[in-house]
Amino acid sequence: MKTGLLVFSLILLALAGCSRVEIMNHNKPDLVVDFSPFEDIGCPLDDYGFRICQETSPLYALGCDFLKPVPDLFGGLDPLYPIAKCVYRPMIHPELVDPYSTPDSEFFYNSGGPLQDLVRYVIYRDGEFLLIRNPDEFRETFAPVESANEALSFTLAFYNYSVYFGLQKESGIKYYVNSIEDTHVENTTDGFTVNVFYYQFFGCGPHYTYALEMDVSKDGMVDEISRQKIFSDPSKDDLCQD
């Protein structure tokens, strides 16, 4: 009888997820990025808040269809040039025979799913705008990585990951772990370990959020160490997004 009760209790716990979750909070770094050189460069805001680069803009000539501010957490970069996201959308270029054939060396990641919003960066240096197309060019510009804040900036530049600060347990959320820690950076012998998050937006549910540990070397290499499913919103289990 006791064995049956124990098994039933374990099943209930498994179905309910982790009911007791400890959350460790960390302070968000106080960083800032200068966007002012990009304000009047031919990529005006439209009615929906998007900066669409006109064909007369020097940024369009560099390969930017859209311009987006980067998070202030890019402010750990050294040198700290004014920097913005340069988004290239092959689907709106009818001259392309195959819009899905852009080489990996031409962008960091795709933030648009099937629409193929390919993220690059543009900096303002010595009076001119310069395109940074891939991680190798980024390392040439900003490496070595010499601080925890710079390691965080590198991670956010290379991958479409998120940061969380001030996390709190929420009712209605299903948790899969007993403890969660805010975004933070730790020193290692050869560089830094950065804790970030990834939300599975595209596709059909469940839409999980994962905690990731990233290794950032002093020479600017960013590699995933581990990935753990931490929570999901059951109300989105039947949701399909593309």
Image (cartoon, rainbow, N blue to C red):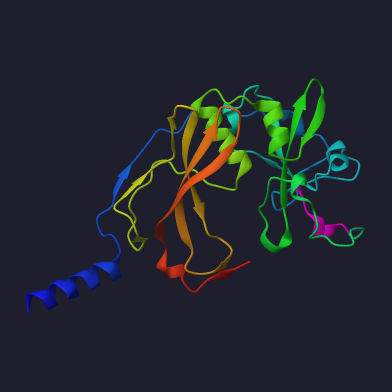
Task: Please tell me in which quadrant of the rendered image residue 37 appears.
Answer: top right
Q: How many marks?
A: 0
* Residue 165 pos. (x, y %): 42, 41
Q: Is residue 229 above or below residue 139?
A: below
Viewport quadrant of the N terminus? bottom left
Q: Residue at x 21, y 69 (%)?
A: 10
**In the depicted view, which residue is nearer to us: 229 or 90?**
229
Viewport quadrant of the C terminus? bottom right
**In the depicted view, which residue is nearer to us: 116 or 100?**
100
* Residue 118 pos. (x, y %): 73, 50
Task: Please tell me in which quadrant of the rendered image residue 14 appears.
Answer: bottom left
Q: Is residue 237 left or right of residue 81?
A: left
Q: Residue at x 52, y 24 (%)?
A: 147
* Residue 187 pos. (x, y %): 44, 28
Q: Is residue 35 visible?
A: no
Q: Is residue 139 left or right of residue 185?
A: right
Q: Residue at x 79, y 60 (%)?
A: 100
Which residue occupies the extreme front position in the image?
Answer: 189
Q: Residue at x 69, y 33 (%)?
A: 138
Q: Is residue 25 magenta?
A: no
Q: Is residue 88 magenta?
A: yes
Q: Give, as a single range, the part of the protein colored magenta.
A: 87-93
